[in-house]
Amino acid sequence: MLGYLLKRLIQMTLVLWIVSVIVFLMMSFTGDPVFMVVPIDASDAEIAQARRLLGLDDSLLVQYWKFLTSLVQGDFGQSYVFRQPAMTLILERLPATVELVLVAMVLAIAVAIPLGVYAGANPQGRISRVIMAGSLLGISLPGFWVGMVLIYLFAVNWGMFPSSGRGDTAEILGLRLSVLTWDGWHHVVLPAITLSLATMAIILRITRAGMMEVGRQDFMKFARAKGATRRDVLYRHGLKNALIPVVTIFGLQLGDLIAFATITETIFSWPGMGKLLIDSIYRADRPVIVVYLMLVALIFVVINFLVDVIYTLIDPRIRLK
Amino acid sequence: MVTGFPETEFFHNYRRSASAIIGSALMVLFAVAVLAGPFLVAQNPYDIASLNLMDSYKPPMWLAGGDPQFPLGTDGQGRDVWASVLYGARISLFIGVVAMLASCTIGTLLGLIAGFHGGLADAVIMRIADIQLSFPSILIALFLMSAVGTGIDKVLIALTAVGWVVYARTVRGSTLSEIEKEYVQAAKVAGLPNHKIIRKHVLPNVLTPLIVIATIQVGTFVLIEASLSFLGVGVPITQPSLGLLIKNGFDVLFSGLWWTSVFPGLAIMMLVFGINLFGDFLRDELNPRLK
């Protein structure tokens, strides 16, 4: 187990290093950041000096070395736009994104698992067919468009929900969260539904497939034969064993939610790090883009690792190698 | 039974599957719309001369103030939404199909190399694939687009860069199991050169699973492209895809002008839903293991 953890830790570091190289190269070959910091009417001498200050005169290798050493020290430089440390900017907005992603995930699971179990247990039923067609539709919908339609109906037309922002937040353990206030919940509903649809559809389909697979197993027949209630058979015996593929997909979906949160946040003006990323892309605010990418890479690598560990915990047949 | 189809199991199942029929009908509908688009509408939405500002923001024809000349209404420049959707679908579908073909070609090639040669090439290709798969495609594409700027060609490159992986992995897997088989061993003993073994023996046997992946990928690519264009880092405004039409419509949504964004979205939904329905059917047919 310890050997496995060590091996994974080395792998994770390696992946992050490769990501840092790719991010650095892409950033170096596109555009000249010097024009982001000097005034429009700067003289050649001023541009040259700014270039020297930014370290753009050095060779690519030297530049990368500086880039890497400051990354490791957690120093990502100043945002060209906000004139604040890029890291601080991202971290300020991280709770809003995490909050939105988690609410969407909980919503997706709460809807998808019962429907998936039902559709898996009654594969030929009419309701199951409707559920499955609905889930396929959920995968086929552009998420941002759903968000717009929701805004049009619930915010513009009926005025039931606000169309943008986080609403009131309350602070707990130093984190400002919307889900702690009524007004915050009011704001989180539409973006969370928008974000959760695709994930809901995918978890539903995996749960159904898992239930159908499990339904053929002898232990399910045995559970039925010994007189367990239908609910017990499905949830205690069936779902528990059908969950293994769901857990694997869960990790991937968490990553997808973080990625798609950039779009959802943009539509609903949700002040998370995804919206900051899109704004920074428009303004070519390189340091902020780099922090976002490295942070998200770190999050993904950790999620993948946790999924693998959880996988072995819930399925003792798989042993860590 | 009298039908135009040869009575194979595939067509037999096809005729009994509602989702396959609906899915392929939607796909045919879009194929026709894309090919015949310019002949179906009087207005060329890119020809400024054919636009009249007097016609701007007309609602769909069944609403008060609608004009039968513009069945789905008009946008702020007096552009027919129906015409924009037809032209936009051309761009969306073109990007989806071309990026799929490029991904499939490059991915299959790399998968064959990795599976057939093994060793260093295999290790490098598969590690890149692993790393890439641990990040959502949309994020990689977004990052690439933010670095290279907008343009149809750039969207194609970004989509291909995220799309090849799934083919490479699949092809590598099936190649590894094919080259163990006796007929490949026999071909080797018979002294056939490697490229001939790959082309004549391995390739035809690893292609079937790719059909399903390729079908569904077109839908995925249409969605990713729409998201990129919606965010403003996809196609340029001179060549609006369905996603960019939605973005343009979003700007006037709060004034209650819903039709400029709702109809392009419905078009994406129908197209991708059709592809997914048909793709699901293909998966069940071509992959009996999953039945």
Image (cartoon, rainbow, N blue to C red):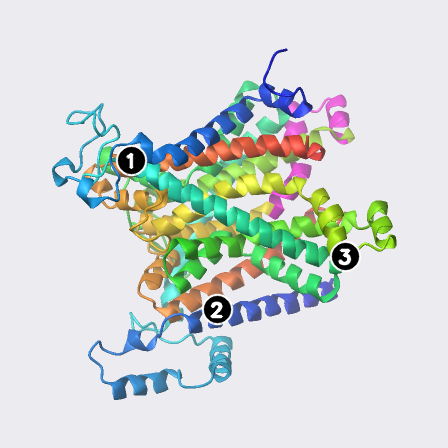
Q: Furthest-top residue in view?
A: B1
Q: Amino acid at mark 1?
A: Ala
Residue at the disc numbered 2:
A23
Residue at the disc numbered 3:
B194
From which residue to which does the magenta span run?
Answer: A219-248
Q: What residue is drawn where x is 52% and y is 39%?
A: A109
Q: Are marks 1 and 2 on the same chain?
A: no
Q: Are marks 2 and 3 on the same chain?
A: no
**Quadrant placement of the C terminus of chain A:** bottom right
Q: Amino acid at mark 3?
A: Asn
Q: Is residue A154 visible?
A: no
**Quadrant placement of the N terminus of chain A:** bottom right
Residue at the disc numbered 1:
B83
Residue A133 percent across, percent down from the top left: 51, 28
The chain identifier of the residue carrying mark 1 reads B
The local secondary structure at tag 2 comes to helix
**Looking at the image, is mark 2 or mark 3 nearer the viewer?**
3
Residue A272 percent across, percent down from the top left: 37, 56
What is the CA distance from the residue labelled 1 to the residue labelled 3? 51 Å
The chain identifier of the residue carrying mark 3 reads B
A283 lies left or right of A71: left
Residue B214 in which image quadrant: top right
User: Is A241 part of what is drawn in magenta?
Assistant: yes
Comparing A115 with B175, the one in front is B175
What is the CA distance from the residue labelled 1 to the residue labelled 2? 40 Å
**Looking at the image, is mark 1 or mark 3 nearer the viewer?**
3
Q: What residue is drawn where x is 72% and y is 43%?
A: B205
Residue A160 percent across, percent down from the top left: 27, 35
Residue A252 percent across, percent down from the top left: 56, 50
